[in-house]
Amino acid sequence: MKSRVVSREISDNRFNPRFLKFIELFVPIDTHEKLFPKECRTCGRTYGSLSEYLLRTVAKGHTLDNAEEVMGEPFTMTYRHCACGNTLVLTFTAETYPVLGELWSMLGEEARSAGKPLNEAVMDFVDQWERYMLAHAKRHREV
Ligand SMILES: [Zn+2]
């Protein structure tokens, strides 16, 4: 029984190497001044960093939206729900996350090579991103 739990933990710690590179590039902008602190206008909760935002909000439905075509420049939005239920939108641009275009090319390639819709590849990415941030935050707390 115990070994089954352990093996699941190990498989949960696996990351798609294609994703990992881009996930790691979010670490330096964890407290980017253009993004944080972010305050929920409904309940007043404040999110001081990207990891806090990812860990204390819940992703529902589609979570990363590429609006580059509409905006005419790299522009990605994340939609996550505050504990109060309000939707908190976070926007990434070339200024906050310089490899935004490459991120979407990678996600497109991942979807094509895995033979799945883009939104599924995006969900996988966000899933692993959350998991990475969780592990990162845990390590940080232990120090
Ligand atoms: Zn709220």
Image: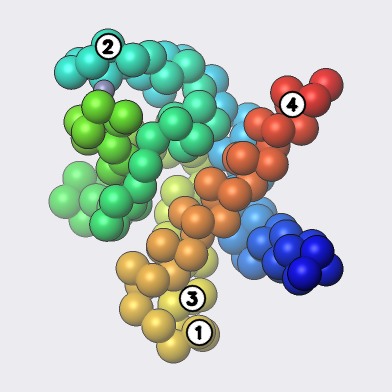
Q: Mark 1: which secondary structure?
A: helix
Residue at which label 2 appears: 44
Residue 116: percent from the left, percent from the top?
A: 40, 83
Answer with mark 4 or mark 3, whichever residue precedes in sequence. Answer: 3
Q: How is the image coloured?
A: rainbow
Whether tag 4 and tag 1 are in contact, CB under 8 A, the answer is no
Q: Looking at the image, is 133 positioned above or below residue 9? A: above
Q: Residue at x 50, y 40 (%)?
A: 98
Q: Earlier in the sequence, mark 1 or mark 2?
A: 2
Q: Earlier in the sequence, mark 4 or mark 1?
A: 1
User: Which residue is located at x 20 percent, y 31 percent?
Assistant: 86
* Mark sitting earlier along the chain (2/4): 2
Residue behind mark 1: 114
Q: Nearer the viewer, mark 4 or mark 1?
A: 4
- Contact flag, marks 2 and 4 (Cβ < 8 Å): no
Percent x, y of residue 75: 31, 44
Of tags 3 and 1, which is closer to the observer? 1
* Residue located beneath label 4 in the image: 140
Q: Which image quadrant for residue 139? A: top right
Splitting the image into four quadrants, where does ligand 1 fall?
A: top left
